[in-house]
Amino acid sequence: MTDATLHIDVWRGTDTGEFQGFAIPRREHQTVLDVVTEIQREHDATLSYRFACRVGMCGSCAMVVNGRPRWTCRTRVRDVIDDGGRLRLEPLRNFTVVKDLAVEMTQFFDKWKDAQGYFEPGPQPQANFAVVPPATPERQAADAGIECIGCGVCYSACDVVAWDKDYLGPAALNRAWTLINDVRDESHTRLDAVSASNGCQACHTHMSCTEFCPKAIAPTYSIAGLKRAVLRRSLRGVL
Amino acid sequence: MTAVLFLAQRATAFVLALAVATHLGTILYAVRGGLTAADILARTHGNVAFALFYALFVIAVAIHAPIGLRNVLREWAQWRGRSLDFTLALFSILLFVLGLRAIFAVYTA
């Protein structure tokens, strides 16, 4: 394994730029993040990328690897290398590129706020711990989406975001859905926030977010849940 | 607004699923025996059930199609705002008027 050479094409630049080729030794159990780090430390110190935890918790290191958005710290080279033995690394799609493989995440997290993706305890937070039985449908719905690490892979994979820059995106809507199912949350306006023209109804159910989420979350189902909740509320208003 | 349009589009889709199937089924059934246009018009003339069915069909189309077209134009042409809503409201009225005119013509033929 150590005799083999890995050829990598890395995006250099911002929205405009070009791919630069590198060659580094292949190693057993090598991750894509290992590859990027080796390039930066051994070949070109000006290469920009982002990482922190290296163990799949922080959501910092996502990139497009051979055309698919992935968390690079938990992606082994041997699982994603193409038939020609090459890796092609690009910044996440649907984000503004800061430089090389690092993208601007501000808009992504601003949309979490727009979707009211934050806990709203109400004017008088409960004095005691809330008892939330694990078997309740609300708790199970919240649990299904709660492990999001905010990596941006779903946002990069989403075609609707590519078409409509205002669309809130899978991660923000998934977070809103977990909060709607949080029995302690007292927001009365979250359904309005997620059903504006840039909200859940714009989802085409392509399921790219669900396909690529590294945490195996299904934002598509969360968004479908939001659509149902908004629909129920609309029907109550009509009937 | 978006939620109401979403609800209206889904509700009319349900109506259209039944109406289009009935419409196509009736056409296939009617032409099997070699009916002429005159034969068909003779059956639709003064037929209240026919007129009501197609009135429902036209109303559903006039609601459903502009909402779908609005979504397409928003996404693919980046057209937003009141001009888009106004244009599609006109399109909805056009579909409604043309549809009712056709029903009236066949009903009174």
Image (cartoon, coloured by chain):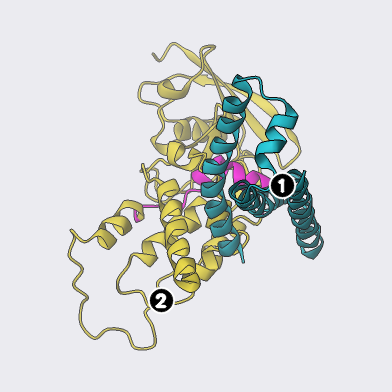
Chain colours: A yellow, B cyan
Q: Position of residue A192 (x, y in %)?
A: 53, 70
Part of the protein shown in magenta: A146-165
Judge whether residue A116 can be spotted in this image: no
Question: Would you say residue A132 sits in the magenta stretch?
Answer: no
- Image position of B29 with respect to A101: above or below: above
Q: Residue at x 47, y 61 (%)?
A: A231
Q: Quadrant of residue A18?
A: top right
Left or right? Give the position of A11 relative to A186. Answer: right
Q: Quadrant of the N terminus of chain A?
A: top left
Left or right? Give the position of A234 relative to A124. Answer: right
Task: Give the camera-side residue of B97 and B89.
Answer: B97
Left or right? Give the position of A80 relative to B43. Answer: left
Q: Position of residue B84 (x, y in %)?
A: 78, 58
Most extreme residue toward the bottom, as rendered?
A124
What residue type is disc 2 on? Answer: Glu
Q: Position of residue B66 (x, y in %)?
A: 70, 52
Q: Residue at x 54, y 68 (%)?
A: A193
From the image, tell me which residue sits under label 1. Answer: B107
From the image, tell me which residue sits under label 2. Answer: A120
